[in-house]
Amino acid sequence: MNYRHSIKSNKIENIRDGKIYCFLTLIFIQGIAIALLFINTTALAATVNPCPQGMAMISGGAFKMGSDNSSFVEERSPRDVTVTNFCIDKYELTNSQFGEFVKSTGYVTVAERPLSQEQFPDLPDEQRLPGSLVFEMAKPGVKQVSFLSWWHWTTGANWQHPFGADSALAQPAAGIASKANYPVVHIAYEDALAYAKWSGKSLPTEAQWEYAARGGLDGATYTWGNEYSEHRANTWQGIFPFFNTKADGHLGIAPVGSFAPNGYGLYDMTGNVWEWTSDLFQIGRDRKSDQINPIALNQGFDPKQPDESELHVIKGGSYLCAPNYCSRFRPAARESESPDTGTTHIGFRLVKNLPSSTLPINSKSQI
């Protein structure tokens, strides 16, 4: 036997085995390092933006709520307000999203229910059919117009049939089959609350909504600055309610995200559809300043609707707001709405509150 050859062969095999062992060990260590890096990156991302998918992180801060430069009394007497960290939907809630909720829960919206005898005791049964308020442009030749000239109670109008089941305006069919990415409308306050509870979120307070809408431009007139532009949001161009020039490309509601976002990456905070907030409406805001996360929960009142006591604040304006009418396409603007009312221009988006320690107050909001 050639022992020298045998010893040499064993040495070569040992060296080869050692190299293989080292190589495998190195791969193992690298794998662990990559895994740890992924875990740390994921944890860091969750820390920087702990919001659910589709929501933007809004870091808390102080701002002037309201406006001194408004002809609307309900916006005046701005006050210093602070909000803490929260998440907010980047887009208005869509037909597709609301449809998932209905499919999962079997929920029936207020507009899909017959009118209650308790609320309308003198109404004949044949007039209790489900329906909602639908906008219709004023007819040519009409000289004197009022609120009742363009809003019509329409049987069968609801979130699935925005213009009524038999309306020729419901294109391409009487429903929303081709409008999955449009904001859901004909949503009463109760409907928005039901969806919020199901999704584990909540309606924004008026302060949260206004702070987010400003997108970091505290004191600016619009969500994009101080100069009005008919191409920055889905609003009415022309003379309301007689004609719309469609200068922004949309005659009615637009798909969500059709216009550029504000400074916080939020879409359609101006125009398209009004959005519910959790605050009850009062003509005069609470005059106290330096409030943290304020919310108005006292009995709502609007002299324009003196018989209503549960009026909620809606924000943002809609595709029906024009410079000659409404003109509430500004962050400070606010309007009252009855909680049982859904129309062709009211929708919503949601928030998710976060611990104030998630990000330091006044740090940059994360998109």
Image: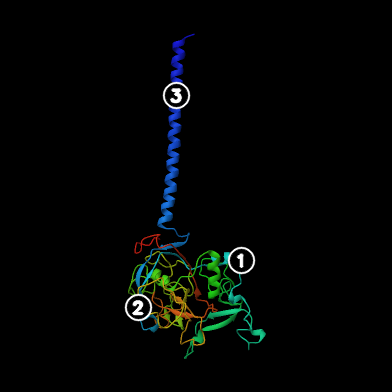
| Tag shown at residue 16 | 3
CA neighbours of label 3 inside 10 A, class few (<14), some (14 to 19), many (20+): few
**Left or right of 100: which side holds 348?**
left
Q: Disc 3 vs disc 2: which is toward the camera?
A: 2
**Left or right of 161: which side holds 142?**
left
Taking the spot 50% from the left edge, 82% from the top edge, the residue there is 137
| Tag shown at residue 105 | 1
Q: Position of residue 254 (x, y in %)?
A: 48, 70
Q: Position of residue 307 (x, y in %)?
A: 52, 87
Amino acid found under the numbered disc labelled 3: Arg
Q: Earlier in the sequence, mark 3 or mark 2?
A: 3
Near-viewer residue (167 or 18)? 18
Inter-mark Cα distance, 2 to 1: 42 Å
Q: Earlier in the sequence, mark 2 or mark 1?
A: 2
Amino acid found under the numbered disc labelled 2: Pro
Q: Which residue is mark 2?
A: 78
